[in-house]
Image (cartoon, grey):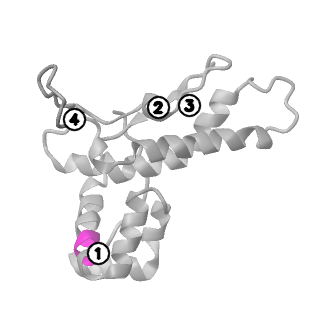
Amino acid sequence: MREGRFIGRIGRFVLPQSTWSHYEEVGAFPRGLLVVGDALCRLNPIYGQGMTLAAQQACILRDLPAGRGGAGDPLADLGQDLFRAIQPTVGGAWGISAVPDFAHPRTSGTRPPDLETDLRFGAGIQRLAARDPDVHRLLLGVRQLLLPPSVLREPTLLRAVEMETGRAGPAAGRTTRQDG
């Protein structure tokens, strides 16, 4: 790098919005066409989940043919099968990264009806994780897509977050469908 020279101005990548394209709603999806990764769901890169989500989708795709049995045409309806199979994975990542962006009033899109509850839960678990290494590990595991959001629904943890926020907690890790 010492001997390198600039060939232009330094640029900055700006992500204007997170998007989740709901291809599962397309009735007759083209045979042999598959959509994964950022083409399916693009998340704010600050969360660092894009590559992990794409890899998880690739693993789901890899395992799909085994569950399809002896289908006469292996590509028939493969797209729809894939979109159905990845819903929980994409939904979990979306709930972790895109829904909290609605805390900012200028964020556009359809706000979940339980947004305030989800944001209060997020703030409470953050405060709890700052003091409790076990909660911190759990929260990191969920954010890094190594653990399912359902681990945050453990009753003892929910009670601890409720005590932290002083209110009843949400169904933590719930996936709220949002359009980008």
**Which marked residue is nearer to the observer: mark 1 or mark 4?**
1
Most foreground residue, 92 or 25: 92
The kind of residue tagged 4 is Ser
**Which marked residue is nearer to the observer: mark 4 or mark 2?**
2
Label 4: few (<14), some or many (≥20) within 10 Å? few
Residue at (35% x, 66% y) in the render: 170
Which of disc 1 and disc 2 is earlier in sequence? Answer: 2
The residue beneath circle 3 is 24
Q: Residue 40 carries which label?
A: 2
Q: Is residue 32 above or below residue 87?
A: above
Report x, y in % for residue 38: 42, 32
Report the quarter where the N terminus lies: top left
Q: Could you tell me which secondary element the residue under label 2 belongs to?
A: loop
For residue 19, side relative to residue 70 (left or right):
left
Which of disc 2 and disc 4 is earlier in sequence? Answer: 2
Report x, y in % for residue 2: 17, 37
Q: Could you tell me which secondary element the residue under label 1 belongs to?
A: helix
Give the distance between the C-alpha atoms of the residues marked 2 and 1, in whole angstroms.
Answer: 31 Å
The kind of residue tagged 2 is Leu
